[in-house]
Amino acid sequence: MRVFLDTNILLDIVGRREPLDTASQQVLERCDALDFDLGVAGHGLATVFYLTGRTAGRASALAVVHQLLSWADVAPLGDAEARAALGFGIADYEDALQAAAAASWEADVLITRDAIGFAGSPVPVLSPDEFLKRYPAPSEGNPGLQP
């Protein structure tokens, strides 16, 4: 299964934005436990780098991006995807670009805290809590869901 993370999920985790970071971090742990692939948008990494750099400095920002790249793929986003995003009917173009990146990466689901903002996404959208309910952790008697 391919799980795409909106930038707000990355910022929750990196910035330890309580109480939002708990469910967002659990999404990462659940994906790891279920051996799901994780994807992010390149422009989301740029946002994380910029915001982290402003508060913690360039070296910390680079370390954060290296860490994110150690467990997530960067979804392709080029001319065709940027143009397609214009037709999704998503009010915020940045959200439309996230959805286009998720679609180009062939994500099965896009995780965001702003599901309303993604109405019109070509990829199904779930909140972190919805994702955690839909995909329970593997345990004895529950080997996890098969994609």
Image (tube, grey):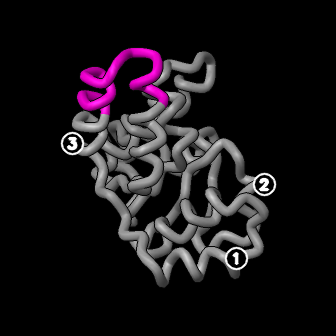
Question: Residue at left 30%, top 39%?
Answer: 68
Q: How many marks?
A: 3
Which residue position is annotated with label 1?
Answer: 88
Quote the CA–CA distance across marks 2 and 3.
Answer: 30 Å
The quadrant of the rendering that contains the N terminus is: bottom left
The tag on residue 1 is none
Q: Position of residue 41 (x, y in %)?
A: 43, 56
Which residue position is annotated with label 2?
Answer: 116
Quote the CA–CA distance across marks 1 and 2.
Answer: 13 Å
Indicate the quadrant where residue 124 lies: bottom right
- Predominant SS of the magenta segment: helix
Which residue position is annotated with label 3?
Answer: 70
Q: Amino acid at mark 1?
A: Phe
Looking at the image, is 108 positioned above or below residue 20?
A: below
Q: Amino acid at mark 3?
A: Ser
Q: Which residues are magenta?
A: 51-64
